[in-house]
């Protein structure tokens, strides 16, 4: 069965510093991978996705993620965070187009 | 354009009362529809999904049920709410006519059972 592990439940980082949110998945077959962002009391918004092709995926708001098949990871990065990046970030995996399995989320706290 | 509507935005209900949350999608046909629940510190839990009218798959046995009376309408219900039903409920859809690119989510319903 597929699963997603987000290694950090909370990540504090100073404004304008770089950030990496970690995500590992388990699956014996090829998967689709996603990062979603959730601002307070809102639904989830797609940041970026990996379906196939280039392992470096660029998304909205300056975020990018790298698919590493050998390490079964899909870490999210941003070179310089802004206070507006304060949110919860969810990594997700799907084997097919029927269901997506989400990680438990990582809360990103931007410190002034 | 394609949009998803979810209502109400917030709801406070007493234990033992019924529940009905509605989700509708516009601008597409025959979508896959999903209900997720988000409880504090527990991530997103898939509750139900539907690939067509009247077709409901339940992921987790619980106090809730779902129905899809129309192609673009998905309803989450309960006959008697429990305190543990409190949470943030999210509806999502995917257009199967498009290449799979992930789900689009509604804005959610915050349910507090008191």
Image (tube, coloured by chain):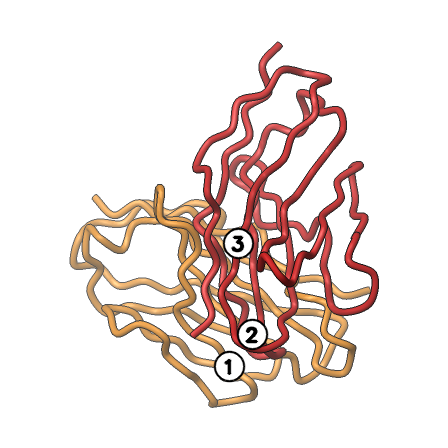
Chain colours: A red, B orange
Residue B36 placement (x, y as % from top left): 45, 62
A39 lies above or below B6: above
Residue lying at the far left in this picture: please name it. Answer: B16
Q: Secondary structure at mark 1?
A: strand
* Residue ID at (54%, 24%): A109
Query: Dot 3 corresponds to which residue?
Result: A24
- With B110 as the anchor, is B73 left or right in this view? right
Where residue B113 appears, x then y in whole percent?
A: 25, 48
Q: Nearer the viewer, residue A39 or A97?
A: A97
Residue A65 location in percent, x, y? 71, 48
Q: Is residue B90 above or below residue A60?
A: below
Quarter occupied by residue A63: top right
Q: Label 3, label 2: how many angstroms apart (C-alpha)? A: 26 Å
The chain identifier of the residue carrying mark 3 reads A
Can you tell which of label 1 and label 3 is closer to the viewer?
Answer: 3
Q: CA distance from mark 1 to mark 3?
A: 28 Å
Q: Secondary structure at mark 2?
A: strand
Residue, x 46% and y 53% (percent of image)? Answer: A5
Q: Which residue is mark 2?
A: B33
Q: How many marks?
A: 3
Q: Secondary structure at mark 3?
A: strand
Q: Mark 3 or mark 2: which is in front?
A: 3
């Amino acid at each position: 069965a597929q699963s997603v592990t987000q290694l950090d439940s909370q990540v504090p980082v100073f404004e304008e510093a770089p950030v990496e949110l970690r995500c590992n998945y388990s699956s014996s077959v090829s998967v689709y991978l996603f990062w979603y962002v959730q601002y307070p009391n809102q639904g989830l918004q797609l940041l970026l996705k990996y379906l196939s092709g280039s392992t470096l995926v660029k998304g909205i708001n300056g975020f990018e993620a790298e698919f590493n098949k050998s390490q079964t990871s899909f870490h999210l990065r941003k070179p310089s965070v802004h206070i507006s990046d304060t949110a919860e970030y969810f990594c997700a995996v799907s084997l097919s187009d029927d269901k997506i399995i989400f990680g438990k989320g990582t809360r990103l706290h931007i410190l002034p | 354009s394609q949009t998803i509507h979810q209502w109400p935005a917030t709801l406070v209900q007493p234990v033992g009362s019924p529940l009905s949350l509605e989700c509708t999608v516009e601008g597409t046909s025959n979508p896959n529809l999903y209900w997720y629940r988000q409880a504090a510190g527990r991530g997103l839990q898939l509750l139900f999904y539907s690939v067509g009218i009247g077709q409901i798959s339940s992921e987790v046995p619980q106090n809730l049920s779902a129905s899809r009376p129309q192609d673009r309408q998905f309803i989450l219900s309960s006959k008697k709410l429990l305190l543990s039903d409190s949470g943030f409920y999210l509806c999502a859809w995917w257009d199967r006519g498009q290449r799979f690119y992930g789900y689009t989510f509604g804005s959610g319903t915050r349910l507090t059972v008191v």
